[in-house]
Amino acid sequence: MANTSHLYAYDSFNPLCKQPFGAVKAGSTVMFSILLTDFSLPRRVELLLYRADEFGTPAIRAPLEIDTVRHAAVGTNRYVCHVRLPDEPQLYFYCFEVEFEGAVRTLRRIDSHNGDFAAEGELWQLTCYSPDYYAPEPPTRGIIYQIFPDRFCRSGMPKEGVPPDRKMHGNWDEGPDYRPNEQGIITNSDYFGGDLRGIAMKLPYLKSLGVSLIYLNPIFEAHSNHRYNVADYFKVDPLLGTNDDFRRLCEQAAEQGIGIVLDGVFSHTGSDSVYFNMEGRYGSGGAYRDPESPFRSWYKFEEYPHRYHSWWGFTTLPEIIEENPDFLEFICGEQGVIRYWMRLGAAGFRLDVADELPDVILERIREAVKAENSDGILIGEVWEDASNKIAYSQRRRYLLGRQLDSAMNYPFMNAVLRYVRYGDYGALYHGVLTILENYPSPSQRLLFNSLSTHDTVRAITMLAGEEYTGGDREWQAQRSHLSDAQYARGRSLLLIAYTLLYFLPGIPCLYYGDEAGVCGWRDPFNRATYPWGREDQWLIEAFRKLGRLYRLADFLPRALFIPFAGTTDVFAYSRSRRFVDREDDRALLVVVNRGEMARDLSGVLPGRYEAHVITGSFENGVLAPMTAVVMFQ
């Protein structure tokens, strides 16, 4: 759907204006061209390429010359240049300067990709990444399954060393606690007892969904049900089992072709930890209680011991000085945390709040992961576009080849959900193509594409529930379950959304229970237990079908994304190898109708295809309302 009518002087999505599309390797050559009418008569046309945040003087000024081959559009001339980029990975931004008779005008971006001589406008982005940037693919072609460990499955096996101050729910099917305690504090101290052995018991089920990678929320010892307040980096929380249980889980998962990715929380610890020990659970040691503690230098005390830097002001989460050499060695060294868990069988790490981790620890973590396994996975939690993120006034370098493999892809989540709920075609089209334009191709193949996570509203609730306008926990609790009518509509919308997501560039990431019909607003309602024995089996079968089709389409990692059609109700795109490899004609087409009316597409669909209906119905080229179809060509 690139601009082929040439109404704009420049369109970064259009191969006529820029080749290659998107991010490029350092040291490569890029073609830029703009289109001007015969009547423009420019004296000078130049590309201005700036290093990120150095906008005073261009790093490169390159003249564009008129193309001797006249462009097909009547009255249009094409001005072209070929620019070899420097060898150093770098984020660039660019625009064009055109000098007319008596005036110099700047051609800038006016939307996600089109440019014009408007008074207001932005620069285009060009990501220039390391030529040796390598991001692995999962062990086998399959989806990612995210598990909040306390809420997925409990084995019933006895545990040793569980602290006595934990509240255990007797009924697996009741809801999580959401009200504050007598002191008005949300403690996250109620547990259901999901454990590692429970996950191991369900590996055949996960395999049936097409899973090849499990992403676990934190499993290290911690004194909350979410376990983001780490107490001991080298120990599995006793309620989840033992380090040996983790090793066995990795071995059993590997037999099923499934890897295990751990959640690494390295920007802060818990105050109730062996490292800080404010509560005294761990004796007389720790940075808070012992001024001579080896851990004291990890933390920034303003007035010892009571005033210290904490994560977002939560005093139970004292911040780490990640650049501290002792901490770096503790996490990334030969005997450090990363290598310890990789040696026990972890396939990699997802890094919590990656935008709060400085470059030095990201680079050291990458070195440690890759030293243990060159195909080890390193994913960052970044909520925005990770290619141009500025955090704490610092431009980040996540995706230039020396830090993250890829990131959690919240931009895709937002784009898909906005389209399926509201019909916002522009959000989907521009949202997807902007990420594909900005992200290096290695990182695109390992994007974690989710519609729900432990930090967001469940997708089915977002799609079919009431409009969320900031309701508090009481409001959310009263609406924690959808009505029958909402749920019936919601599961169709959920399948439409996941069908769109499964075949986009990256890897689909299914949050535990979405496939079973679990609803829920924000934390803690999005962290309810998996409803074993009460699952929506029809929905699960639909997700199994999606998983089978995804594994069948093994050409996806290196297939082009080509938008095919888009309206408020109908969206279609293809994933094709045909323009990448002339001898490989494999392709598929994803078509959805989120609307209330049938749509006849018989005149625009390819002549031959094998249709797989995920939800709704599709006959003789007609999409019924609320339908999602995957077509192999």
Image: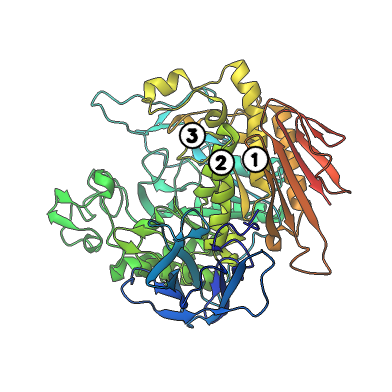
Tell me which numbered mark, 2 or 1, is placed earlier along the sequence: 2
Q: Residues within 10 Å of mark 1 (few under 14, many from 20)?
A: many
Q: Which mark is residue 457?
A: 3
Q: Quadrant of residue 474?
A: top left
Q: Toward the viewer: 527 or 78? A: 78
Q: Residues within 10 Å of mark 3 (few under 14, many from 20)?
A: many
Q: Residue at x 52, y 35 (%)?
A: 151
The residue indicated by pointer 2 is 451
On the rendered structure, is 445 left or right of 369? right
Q: Secondary structure at mark 3?
A: loop
Estimate the x, y position of residue 62 in percent, counting from the top left: 47, 81
Q: Residues within 10 Å of mark 2 (few under 14, many from 20)?
A: many
Q: Amino acid at mark 2?
A: Leu
Q: Residue at x 26, y 43 (%)?
A: 314
Q: Which mark is residue 498?
A: 1
Residue contact between numbered discs 2 and 1, judged by CB atoms under 8 Å: yes
Estimate the x, y position of residue 71 in percent, counting from the top left: 66, 70
Tell me which numbered mark, 1 or 3, is placed earlier along the sequence: 3
Q: Could you give the CA–CA distance between mark 1 and mark 3, rounded to whole angstroms?
A: 15 Å
Estimate the x, y position of residue 142 in percent, counting from the top left: 69, 52
Q: Secondary structure at mark 2?
A: loop
Q: Could you give the CA–CA distance between mark 3 and mark 2, rounded to whole angstroms?
A: 9 Å
Q: Can see residue 271?
A: no
Q: Amino acid at mark 1?
A: Tyr
Q: Toward the viewer: 149 or 367? A: 367
For residue 425, above or below residue 469: below
Estimate the x, y position of residue 238 in percent, counting from the top left: 45, 44
